Amino acid sequence: MLFKRNRIWWYGFQFRGRRIQESSHCTSKHKAQQLEAKRKVDLIEGRAGIRRAPVPRFEDAVQQFLEWSRCKHRPKTHELHKMNCKTLSRYFAAKWLDQITLEMVDQFRFMRLREERKNANDGSTVSHATVNRALATLRLIFHRVELMSPTRKEMFFKEEGQTRVVSVEEELAYLREASPLLRDIATIILQTGMRPEEVFRMEIRNINLAQRRIFNPFGKTKAAQRTISMTTEVCDILCRRLKQAKGRFVFCSPARPGQPAQPDRAIQSVRKAHDAAVRRAGIRDHFRLYDLRHTYATRAAQAGVDLLTLAALLGHTTVQMTSRYVHPTDQHKVEAARKLEEYNAEIRFKLAGAVSGSLQNPLQ
């Protein structure tokens, strides 16, 4: 059935006991009829052909998807999907899956971009990467129930690199404003290149103060399982922390108000403390805790550490991955230009000397 609303044609029909009523977004009745026919085909056709099972509601599909994800994915990946599902539910919770259209998804991604970043006090909004992760989760939800996803490849935003190198001045200001716990964690990342979660989950049994080594037993790849050397400052921090430790982790989760301490549970996040320290330090260009790892890699490369060794230190499988972590600063580029200028002047001087010597001794 077709009907008009403010010059726009709408269509309505029954599908498996449910009333489907949607706008065609066009003023042509013929075009609206075509869109209605296409919508009916899309409803009964899925990626695997004709569907006989009833299409679930979004919240039911999310519950099934998260149960599958808990068994299939790594804990960190599962938590990411769980967080994305919570965001998606704010937009699609009341919908049946086959009611979610391309237009709805397109509207979702632009509305999401205008939302303020969680716990942000600088007015910054959600990034393209965050929206893309939610779209990827939405696509997986549809694939799990064998329905054609309303997301398309062209809907994903082009992601711009968000990593940056922290300057020495910013580092000193940040550490000065950081809490003792955050200062120790940030210093370890800056001087070892460990991932934040690797520091959070550092166990006492994997620390060898005598040999000044840290063993990391877990990670996404085999290369992430590595032995890391300590600097003197990191060794002093861990020596102090080990004397205070009461459980298996160096940085155990602090006790919540009204609850007993949990010495055998690793700390999960320091994001609030990190954001507060950045704000108090007066750093305008916000950086993530993970950017301290990029800072370590860049400084190590500037100090002359070769990429192969740096890849082993960072726990990377390939040198190509390591090269993405090295971000030459403007000062480093100026220094490189100065070195090239000095080298060119040196070889020209030697060449001029050789030419002059041959002119003075033509018989040689």
Image (cartoon, grey):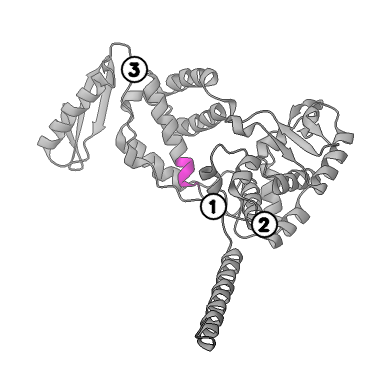
- Tell me, yes or no, whether the two marked residues, 3 and 1, touch with CB atoms within 8 Å: no
Residue bearing mark 2: 303
Q: What is the x, y in percent for residue 360? A: 54, 88
159 vs 346, left or right, is left
The residue located at (67%, 57%) in the rendering is 303
| Residue 238 figure quarter | top right
Of the image marks 3 and 1, the number of the one nearer the N terminus: 3
Which residue type does callout 2 highlight?
A: Ala
| Residue 271 figure quarter | top right
Of the image marks 1 and 2, the number of the one nearer the N terminus: 1
The answer to whether residue 146 is magenta is no
Q: At numbered mark 3, what does the secondary structure look like: helix, strand or loop?
A: loop
Region in magenta: 126-131
Q: What is the x, y in percent for residue 95? A: 38, 26
Comparing 356 with 281, the one in front is 356
320 vs 30, left or right, is right
Residue bearing mark 3: 55
Comparing 291 with 317, the one in front is 317
Comparing 9 with 89, the one in front is 89
Q: What is the x, y in percent for residue 329? A: 58, 61
Q: In whole angstroms, how far apart are the C-alphas of marks 1 and 2?
A: 34 Å
**Residue 267 seen:** no
**Residue 13 seen:** yes
Residue bearing mark 1: 124
- Tell me, yes or no, whether the two marked residues, 1 and 2, touch with CB atoms within 8 Å: no
